[in-house]
Amino acid sequence: MSSHCPFRLSILLTVFAAGLALLMPASVVPLHAQTASQQTGQQAALSDGAKAENNPENKPSAESAPPQAAPAATGNPAAQKGVTGKAIDKVREVAKSAGDIFSRVPCLPPKGASKSMGSLPRVANKLVAGQPVVIVAFGSSSTQGYGSSSPEFTYPNRLAAQLRRKYPTADISVVNAGKGGEDAPEMMKRLQTSVIDLRPDLVIWQVGTNAVLRNLDPAETAKLIDEGIARIQAAGSDIVLIDPQYSPRVNEHAESAGKMMKLLNKTAELRKVGVFPRFAVMKDWHERQAIPIENFVIADGLHMSDWGYACFAQLLGDDIIKSVGQIKLGVAVPSDVRAYRPM
């Protein structure tokens, strides 16, 4: 009997060790699963949620978890589903918002606007005559469309869509000649090739914001703008100036911005061109219509959002349409043709 005891003891120790080995993974899996779930949730919150499970950087490394622990990364399906579900809901919300902007822009005109954009006889007469119309949107990043979610939401494309809906048989081209970071000094260098050589019927010139942010002399900027207007008029184009936007970063330079807008209006008056008062329009959105700034300015505190670009384009388009309507009626278009309308 004694000769068999060591053999039995060996068998018992082997069975015990095997059982302990089988139990160990089960005891450590919840820790690894929790860690992987937390990593997945954090990654989902930082990105779009839907890509978290497939992100290689989101998986535990070979050193930190045994191979059998990897499938347990979804050990908390309720939490994972909640994070992913919220991300998907956010995507749907953004998509719905974009769709709403396309169908109808929920923006209102400012009340009691005292300054008119002026008439646009060349572009109006060409639309009335059924001739092709070329519009050049000239400017910096807010013309280029920085801050918009896609090219469709830039103000030149929104304006083009509005005018084509109003004049479905007309051949209307709106060229986006915006280039981020520029102001009058840089724009004047490409005025000929980016604008005049295209022989536009209307030039919408957004200028002055970067001059304010860069602390350029408003008077020197105004001189360059006056020179540019003279060259554009000599080419036979209508002109509309767009002043700086109402936004936190521009408002930090309130004195300079105020001087810039006064000089733009004085130059426009002397040259008999229109000014679209973007600053006053956006200020009205916030102060009179109680629209939060973050609804029309993105997080950088400067550039406009999809809604801001769309509403701006809608109101600008209304002025162009009003001018065309006056020409159609055979009315001598007065200087004050501003006619914003609620949508």
Image: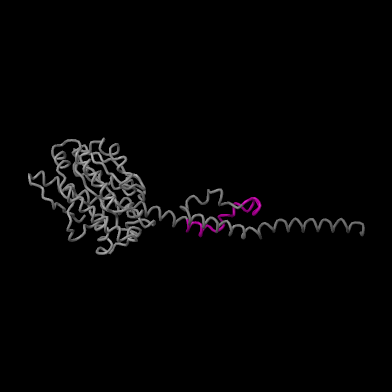
- Give the magenta part as a residue range: 61-83
Along the viewing direction, whichever of 89 and 259 lies nearer the viewer = 259
Determine whether 205 is above or below 29 in the image: above
Marks counted in the figure total 0
Q: Residue at x 34, y 47 (%)?
A: 182
In the picture, measured across the screen, residue 285 lies left or right of residue 87, that is: left
Q: Which quadrant of the figure contains the N terminus?
A: bottom right
**Residue 137 image offset from top left, x and y in percent:** 27, 44
> In terms of secondary structure, what is the magenta stretch mainly?
helix
Q: Nearer the viewer, residue 121 or 94?
A: 121
- Is 77 magenta? The answer is yes
Do we see residue 97 in this rendering? Answer: no
Q: Position of residue 167 (x, y in %)?
A: 18, 42
Residue 266 place in picture, x, y as percent = 20, 53
Considering the image in quadrants, where does the C terminus appear? bottom left
Residue at horizontal 7%, vertical 44%? 330
Q: Is residue 118 visible?
A: yes
Q: Position of residue 246 (x, y in %)?
A: 30, 58
Residue 251, picture quadrant: bottom left
**What residue is drawn where x is 22% and y is 52%?**
276
